[in-house]
Image (spheres, rainbow, N blue to C red):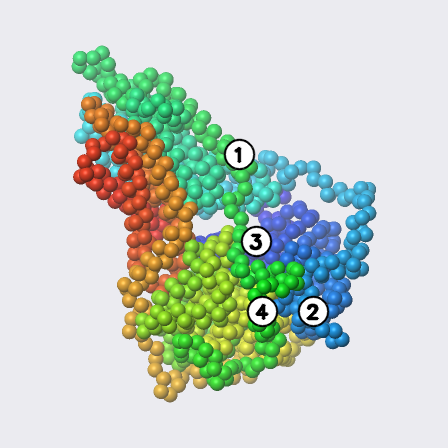
Amino acid sequence: MGGQESSIVTEYILKILGLDICADTLVGNEMLRGISGGQRKRVTTGEMLVGPAKALFMDEISTGLDSSTTYQIVNSLRQTIHILGGTAVISLLQPAPETYNLFDDIILLSDGQVVYQGPRENVLEFFEFMGFKCPGRKGVADFLQEVTSKKDQEQYWYRGDRPYRFVPVKQFADAFRSFHVGKSIENELKVPFDRTRSHPAALATSKFGVSRMELLKATIDRELLLMKRNAFMYIFKAVNLTLMAFIVMTTFFRTNMRRNVEYGTIYLGALFFALDTIMFNGFAELAMTVMKLPVFFKQRDLLFFPAWAYTIPSWILQIPITFVEVGVYVFTTYYVIGFDPSVSRFFKQYLLLLAINQMSSSLFRFIAGIGRDMVVSHTFGPLSLLAFAALGGFILARPDIKKWWIWGYWISPLSYAQNAISTNEFLGPSWNQIVSGTNETIGVTVLKNRGIFTEAKWYWIGLGAMVGYTLLFNLLYTLALSVLSPLTDAHPSMSEEELKEKHANLTGKALEGHKEKNSRKQELELSHISDRNSGISGADSSDSRKRLVLPFTPLSLTFNDTKYSVDMPEAMKAQGVTEDRLLLLKGVSGSFRPGVLTALMGVSGAGKTTLMDVLAGRKTGGYIEGEITVSGYPKKQETFARISGYCEQNDIHSPHVTIYESLVFSAWLRLPAEVDSDRRKMFIEEIMDLVELTSLRGALVGLPGVNGLSTEQRKRLTIAVELVANPSIIFMDEPTSGLDARAAAIVMRTVRNTVNTGRTVVCTIHQPSIDIFEAFDELFLMKRGGEEIYVGPVGQNSANLIEYFEEIEGISKIKDGYNPATWMLEVSSSAQEEMLGIDFAEVYRQSELYQRNKELIKELSMPPPGSRDLNFPTQYSRSFVTQCLACLWKQKLSYWRNPSYTAVRLLFTIVIALMFGTMFWDLGSKTRRSQDLFNAMGSMYAAVLYIGVQNSGSVQPVVVVERTVFYRERAAGMYSAFPYAFGQVAIEFPYVLVQALIYGGLVYSMIGFEWTVAKFLWYLFFMYFTMLYFTFYGMMAVGLTPNESIA
């Protein structure tokens, strides 16, 4: 089966996981559109299932999946485990009752202790033994997650003969050991294991699944595929080299160059520039390697392959590309510049530059393998380049290198390259004329003047050194990937209040200063929420709104026969499809009203997010048809962005600001200028109370999965950032995805609180528990293909929804205790449609419910008497100057709290200044020889070039992180592109000024340049603006390119 593009197992797993519909779609990332978040999660699961593993440890595999798909996956796993005799331990966040019932054993962990471990059938018996009972319409999994919590536990106490007393986690754990299931496990563990019962599959005879050759073949095939998919990167590099070659050949054009000692120095400069250009060409390997490392570390730790099987293809497969890239440069420039016309020397230069390019790529892969982080790697990459170049024999001639640095000359790859390329050129026939008054040729004189060796053997020594360094760096790269681990681990923030709660859950001890404020009132009373009517009365809404400082206008949103299509992909046209457009939404209609919480649901690929993006105006491509109105007036995107909020599924925020600062920034730019600073701050405080973030106000947001806020806290922050804009309509894309039942309840309480203020709220949701599903007022259900099949109220205990589907002939009745959300998706699936021979979309269009909805849409599409269309005098809430000040304010905070960028950059500058100062010590005062002037200019050239390159490279990861935030904030109508660019550019001025002062002060004094105020200030002036130029160039490169590798 090895080496095949597909196999029966692969196809089977794709079908089980529902990935067959996107099997040939790119996975994608933040900047490359690919499969959805739920599909990406299933790819991770499939990656494990297609292998031979008999023991599976699966963490949160249901995140982003609808409940019916989760059920299908877990059911397939259950059958596989039972038939093949494997073991699976699966953690799930919000399992539906039917999914929970598939498990044989349950392990309940709370605050680091095992509360229960044993058969699923006995878990409720244990908690009843402890005095707690699961309510009838409560999912057992949700009950288990809440019963150990101090805030939730009391509602489940059922012993009326004795008063409730909080049972801490430690007491549960101790009681379990005396429970019959706990005793049974303890007795089982006391019996020594009988080795005769060992399964032969438990002993692995080889570390990896296939032979070494097959491993290598598989990784070569994958690397080839990735290179094809990333062809733009290699084309871009070749074009870049072509442009550089054009600049070089026009600068050093041979009609202006003669064969003498004076022009020999210029030819030497052209050779050094060739070395430099080819060295820099390998710099792109740095970003490409770092971006691939997370996947490598995951697969290496799972024993997919050893490090050498990964590093060899990344080296070997680059060699043919090197021939093309170097060929573009050498074939273009060699004869135009006028190097020695000998064909053998032409090909020797080509061969040497090939070796240099390979050495450079290997060096930067090695640095990336050690750094494992974009900022760290972009700091040490230019540092190594600078050290090698400064000690390479051109910038500072070998005889002038101080004795304490001469060792650096002998280990620098560029010193060997410089000797090799120089001897190849200047020992050629065209440089054989004798210099008058000496017995030496012009070529030898030029070499001696620059301290370069004059023996022909140095070409072969240099070529051998390049090959040796290439092998060494690849070996070190392999070694680094073999022994090093990923650089960062996740460290979510935890507020003092949460720490106290954890301590109380564990020990049961009351904490000093902690008062119980009617905990059940603060928790999401979802069981009571389902008792309300489908809407909220105007009086109720009004009462809720009075609690907020800023008023808002409740608005409805209607859409009638809305269609969305994109150009037909070429791949589908090649398969015989004749249509020019692919229809993703097929004429959907509905209405969202103030004070009504609407769930937008459907299986993966139904078009939920597509519909939400169309309504919110987030679709920048494609074709939108149909009527969309806001309180009866046609929707205009410019004004709609001012009264709406959009909570994206991926919680994108600036990592180096606090929660409070994030809200201040959003409110500053999105609330109108009439709202003064005091009212704005009061409103922010109210919103933080509403979404329960007050205790975390000073916590840094951080990077997802690395540090800062937990997933649930990020979700609430995303909602808060939109709420401080005081919108009338809010769209939320999967607000509970990736959360456990308790965290999802907290987020849903936030959502419910938002609706209770009278706002219009729409949420896409994947696998809600019974409680969360019944917290919604209305449901907009879609089927795959972009058609609605139910639009209407959920009803008390989901009665309206269940009644609608059970009336359809052939639909099975819902079982007792079954989750209506899961049942609804199962009975309306494509398989059910085929089996029953019906189209659920057509059934809905023929229903009385559809007619009522059409009447409602018609009613809401008419403007109320006395109302006015939305109109704002300006596109943005705040003036251009305010936008600039706000963006600069946030950048100031971000830079100050980002020492991995700001502090490392200053430290790098100090190191470079000390290196240069000691390398060029007191050479500034020596002006007798022309070589002394070359050395002085070399120090300035190297500083300008390499510190500039470091600035350019290290700023790019910072800009990349903020770029995704910029896209979200600009789409929300917070500011235009210019104020954002102004903030990012302006904040660099003081930091680069400090950098220039540190470098200039140290280097100027250590090199011994002439001490006059004017000369020193001119030196600082040019250093400062050169560093700024390179820094801004790095920012511009990110802005112009799709990813960091190309930038």
252 horizontally vs 829: left or right? left
Within 10 angstroms of label 1, few (less than 14), some, or many (20 or more) residues?
some
Q: Which residue is located at x 38 percent, y 52 percent? A: 896
For discs 3 and 2, the disc positioned in front in the rendered view: 2
In the rendered image, the vertical position of residue 538 relative to residue 210, given as above or below: below
Within 10 angstroms of label 4, few (less than 14), some, or many (20 or more) residues?
few
Task: Check disc 3 and report the residue beneath it.
Answer: 43
Q: State the image coordinates of residue 735 (x, y, percent, origin top left).
A: 52, 66
The answer to whether residue 1040 of the structure is visible from this angle is no
Q: Which residue is located at x 35 percent, y 77 percent? A: 870
Whether residues under marks 4 and 3 lie with C-beta atoms below 8 angstroms apart, the answer is no
Front residue (pair 766, 521) = 521
Identify the residue at the far front of this view. Answer: 512
Q: Which mark is residue 165?
A: 2
The amino acid on which the numbered mark 1 sits, given as a three-letter code, is Leu
Between marks 1 and 4, how big is the CA–CA gap?
A: 56 Å
Between marks 4 and 2, how big is the CA–CA gap?
A: 16 Å
**Element at label 2:** loop
Dot placed on the residue nearer the N-terminal end, 1 or 2: 2
Task: Check disc 1 and report the residue beneath it.
Answer: 479
Task: Check disc 4 and report the residue beneath it.
Answer: 515
**Element at label 1:** helix
**Element at label 4:** loop
The amino acid on which the numbered mark 4 sits, given as a three-letter code, is Lys
Front residue (pair 531, 927) = 927
